[in-house]
Image (cartoon, rainbow, N blue to C red):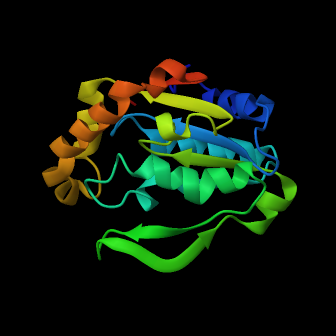
Amino acid sequence: MSTDRPGWAEDVAGAVLGADRRGPLVRVVAVEGRSGSGKSMVAARVCRALADRDEPVALVTMEDLYPGWEGLAEAPALLRSWVLLPLAEGRPPAWHRYDWKHGAFGAERVTLPAALVARGGTLVVEGCGSGAAPVRDLPDLLVWVEADARTRARRLDAREDADTYAPHRASWARQENALYACDPPRDRADLLVENGPQ
């Protein structure tokens, strides 16, 4: 489906609500794709569409779990052990956000809203690595967000933190290539969202 088509987010929300839960507490949706594909926008719109249907929903971004600019390969395992495995086992998860300014995980524990867990809502996990091999057995639905290289480059140039990101851009792309080479999430995606130029 394409983000050019009206109602696409509502269609994704419908697919989310139709997906069976693997764990007893919360349905998990991974929104995966390369840098600049528009994962954050897609995830936010899907969360809004779910909330409009009175579905309790929360969003976790992988940027909170990457252990630094060279940490993409490690992040899926952290997502698994800190967030998704506890949910699958019926336990509320807790984790620490990475503090990019200080270069370390912060001390404050982060948890999901109690209402989300109590009512059995949906957790949307957005970011590179959210559907990678180490977590492939845990999301109930995998959404791949696709955009061509030119569109992705334009979006990366326009990021609010473009100056901070620029020195790490080539390295991050290499990390993406390495992560996706062994088990491409795009090939396993339940839904493909084409997110071309807007």
| Residue drawn at point x = 62 percent, y = 47 percent | 124
Q: Position of residue 153 (x, y in %)?
A: 23, 35
Q: Nearer the viewer, residue 187 or 183?
A: 183
| Residue drawn at point x = 41 percent, y = 56 percent | 63
- Vertical relation: 13 (above or below) 164: above
Q: Nearer the viewer, residue 49 or 15?
A: 15
Q: Position of residue 95 (x, y in %)?
A: 55, 67
Q: Is residue 153 left or right of residue 23?
A: left
Q: Is residue 141 visible?
A: yes
- Quarter of the image with the N terminus is top right
Q: Position of residue 39 (x, y in %)?
A: 46, 40
Residue 164 appears in which quarter of the rendering? bottom left
Residue most extreme to the bottom: 107
Q: Nearer the viewer, residue 98 or 161?
A: 98
Residue 163 appears in which quarter of the rendering? bottom left
- Vertical relation: 25 (above or below) 99: above
- Quarter of the image with the C terminus is top left
Q: Is residue 42 visible?
A: no
- Vertical relation: 42 (above or below) 111: above
| Residue drawn at point x = 80 percent, y = 51 percent | 25
Q: Position of residue 37 (x, y in %)?
A: 38, 34
Q: Nearer the viewer, residue 159 or 91?
A: 91
